[in-house]
Amino acid sequence: MQTILIVEDERDLAELLSFNLEREGFKTIIATDGLEGLANVGHCQPDLVILDLMLPGMLGTDVCKNLKKSERTSHIPVIMLTAKGEEIDKVVGFEVGADDYVVKPFSSRELLLRVKAVLRRTNTESVSSPMLLFGLIMIDTDRHIVMVDGEEIFFTSTEFKLLHTLAQRPGRVQSRDVLLRDVWGYNFVEDSRTVDTHITRLRTKLGSAGDLIKTVRGFGYKLDLQ
């Protein structure tokens, strides 16, 4: 049974989320402030965290930063849950490592679909070969490890999936819509900036090897040695 940690200071909403998730077969844990949520992640190692942005004790952005900079917890996917729906707020959420972003008010069905999509792309291996090599980049799909010129680089689950997807299709241009479908697991075209933000993070983390990710203006991206 997969465990989901809900970090939400509105107790009624947290309990509603817990009820709906447990009805779908998940185990849930509730934390009502940022520090408690961070402590719970360390103790129970959940499969996914649903994280409110505005929390007492520690903001959700700071909780997410702490999770993503730790080797023990960087692989745990995070869905930001917040009333702040401006584009800049979403960009900030993705920049600190969130895997998805749901704006209040939302339907329980929408959240459940997003939870399942994030868990599916985190847990599913889509290629038969456990190792992909591309220039200085080595991707170990079995262990979810990326090495650049012999040095291990830590990626979130979504960053790993995005790089993995591009590496499986070398030299082939991938549109933002295709990447949203194949990496995020569903279509939300209005949030295509999500892809751009994650590509920027990939390039930064890959260092000089980030130049292998090419922008095709007006269309999308490709991983190419040329």
Image (cartoon, rainbow, N blue to C red):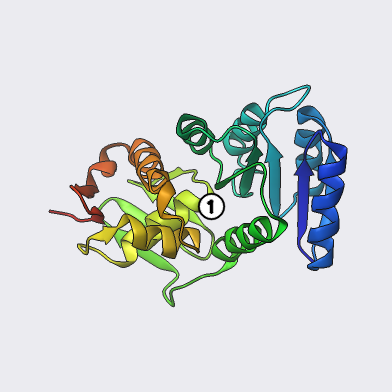
Q: In the displayed image of the protein, which residue is found farthest to the left?
A: 226
| Figure quadrant of residue 67 | top right
In the picture, measured across the screen, residue 121 lies left or right of residue 87, that is: right
Residue at 46 percent of width and 30 percent of height: 88
**Residue located farthest toward the top when viewing the structure as drawn:** 57
Can residue 139 be seen by looking at this rendering? no
Q: How many marks?
A: 1
Position of residue 59 measured from the top left corner of the image (x, y, whole percent): 68, 25
Q: Position of residue 107 (x, y in %)?
A: 68, 54
The residue at the point 17 percent across, 54 percent down is 225
Which residue corresponds to mark 1? Answer: 157
Q: Which residue type carries mark 1? A: Ser
Which quadrant would the N terminus be assigned to in this image?
bottom right
**Nearest to the observer: residue 38 or residue 186:** 186
Packing grade of label 1 (10 A; few <14, some 14-19, many >=20) is many
Q: Is residue 136 left or right of residue 205?
A: left
Determine whether, in the image, residue 108 is placed left or right of residue 198.
right
Question: Can you tell which quarter of the image residue 205 is in?
Answer: top left
Q: Is residue 38 in sight in this rendering?
A: yes
Relative to 198, residue 54 above or below: above
Q: Nearer the viewer, residue 193 or 77?
A: 193
Residue at the (50%, 52%) spot, across then down? 158
In this rendering, position of residue 118 left or right of residue 51: left
User: Can you tell which quarter of the image residue 122 is in?
Assistant: bottom right
Secondary element at image label 1 = helix
In the rendered image, residue 109, in percent from the top left (x then y), is placed at 68, 61
State the residue in front, 67 or 37.
37
